Amino acid sequence: MEKDKADWLWRRFEEIGKTALSCYVLQNIIASFIFYGWGLGLGGTYGAFFTLLIWILISGLLMVAARLWLRRFASGPVERLWRRLSDLPVRKT
């Protein structure tokens, strides 16, 4: 039974790994919206516990989003864009 629980958790980490750049970008957008003035501006208003709670909620949201995304695609959207841009031919000047 313990192996099944560990396998489930490792699969969630694998999904986050396949969408790591996308999750990183989205996490920064969400957190900056929550904490900086262009969004809710909650930075410095609450303590460390609130910040940790927000981080846990964002991480859970990203785990769900990564799982749903990978049901249709092999990698995250930013990873796909990065791969497409890196395959462009180099122009000689």
Image (tube, rainbow, N blue to C red):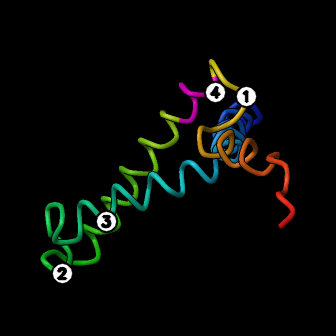
User: From the image, which quarter does the N terminus lie in?
Assistant: top right
Q: Amino acid at mark 1?
A: Ala
- Classify residue 66 by image quadrant: top right
Q: Which mark is on residue 44?
A: 2
Separation of marks 4 and 1 at Cα, in angstroms: 6 Å
Image depth: mark 2 or mark 1 in front: 1
Q: Are marks 4 and 1 in contact (CB under 8 Å)?
A: yes
Separation of marks 3 and 4 at Cα, in angstroms: 25 Å
Q: Amino acid at mark 2?
A: Gly
Residue closer to the observer: 51 or 86: 86
Mark positioned earlier in the residue sequence (2 or 4): 2
Mark positioned earlier in the residue sequence (3 or 4): 3
- Classify residue 79 by image quadrant: top right
Residue closer to the observer: 61 or 87: 87
Q: Are marks 3 and 4 in contact (CB under 8 Å)?
A: no
Mark positioned earlier in the residue sequence (3 or 2): 3
- Name the spot of residue 8 as percent of width and height, x first: 67, 33
Let me know if residue 84 is in the magenta part: no
Magenta stretch bounds: 66-70
Residue topped by disc 3? 32
Mark positioned earlier in the residue sequence (2 or 1): 2
Question: Considering the numbered disc 3 on the image, is that residue within a helix, a strand or a loop?
Answer: helix
Residue topped by disc 1? 74
Image depth: mark 3 or mark 2 in front: 3
Residue topped by disc 4? 70
Q: Are marks 2 and 1 in contact (CB under 8 Å)?
A: no
Separation of marks 2 and 4 at Cα, in angstroms: 35 Å
Mark 4 neighbour class, 10 Å CA radius: few under 14, some 14 to 19, many 20 or more = some
Q: Are marks 3 and 1 in contact (CB under 8 Å)?
A: no
Separation of marks 3 and 1 at Cα, in angstroms: 28 Å
Q: Are marks 2 and 4 in contact (CB under 8 Å)?
A: no
Question: Considering the numbered disc 4 on the image, is that residue within a helix, a strand or a loop?
Answer: helix
